[in-house]
Image (cartoon, rainbow, N blue to C red):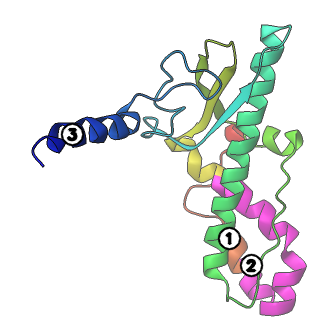
Amino acid sequence: MRALLPLCLVVCFIVSAPAHAECGYPDSDRGQAPDWLCGKGDFEGAGFLAVGDKSRMPSISLQNRLAGKTAMTAVVSKIYAHAAAELQAELPESLQLSVTNRVDWAQVARFKGISVLEKAVSPQRHLYVLAGVEAELQAGMVYTARREILASNKAQIIASLGKDVWRKLNMPMDKPMTDAQH
């Protein structure tokens, strides 16, 4: 029995080693990926974080633009989901908001202030981009998404709950976007 103890310790160490290993790039077994790519921790002072990526392309500039566009589109999707969840909490369960899952580049353009926070290139030259919204701009962006969701569900809300409830839901929040943020 005592002879098996060192063997058990070695097996336990081997099995647990990958769990404690540093995060690698998804497309390569070489290199150390940044914490934000591994899903560890938050990025200081930013929210609605999303990662976009693009494999090697003939033009580095094009690779940067496409990876950034993917990340920014994912950020806007997260903002819409957050605003829809907030609105849904204010409505009765019998009324379900319809929110589109498709976010196009025209919608992303309405959300000024989404920024690329970090970039990382894997050993295989795959580009990863982290985008998000700085803390002071988050409330304004949620407000914009909330207004768009309410506008697209106006007829349904008025038919179910009345015009007064729709007006109350559509009232400005504490921190609406300024003209500079539009």
Q: Residues within 10 Å of mark 1 (few under 14, many from 20)?
A: few
- Disc count in the image? 3
For disc 3, the marked residue is: 9
Q: Amino acid at mark 1?
A: Met
Q: Picture quarter containing residue 28? A: top right
Kind of element beneath mark 3: helix
Question: Which residues make up the magenta segment?
Answer: 142-167
* Residue 58, position as x, y percentages in the image: 86, 8
Kind of element beneath mark 2: helix
Taking depth in this image into account, of 51 and 8 the one nearest to the observer is 8
Q: Amino acid at mark 3?
A: Leu
Structural distance between the alpha carbons of marks 2 and 1? 6 Å
* Residue 39, position as x, y percentages in the image: 50, 40
For disc 2, the marked residue is: 167
Structural distance between the alpha carbons of marks 1 and 3? 63 Å
Work out whether mark 2 precedes mark 3 in sequence or the reverse, and give the earlier one.
3
- Left/right placement of residue 49 relative to residue 98 reads left
* Residue 97, position as x, y percentages in the image: 78, 75
Q: Are marks 2 and 1 in contact (CB under 8 Å)?
A: yes
For disc 1, the marked residue is: 171
| Image position of 58 with respect to 158: above or below | above
Q: Residues within 10 Å of mark 3 (few under 14, many from 20)?
A: few
Image quarter in which the C terminus is found:
top right
Structural distance between the alpha carbons of marks 2 and 3? 66 Å
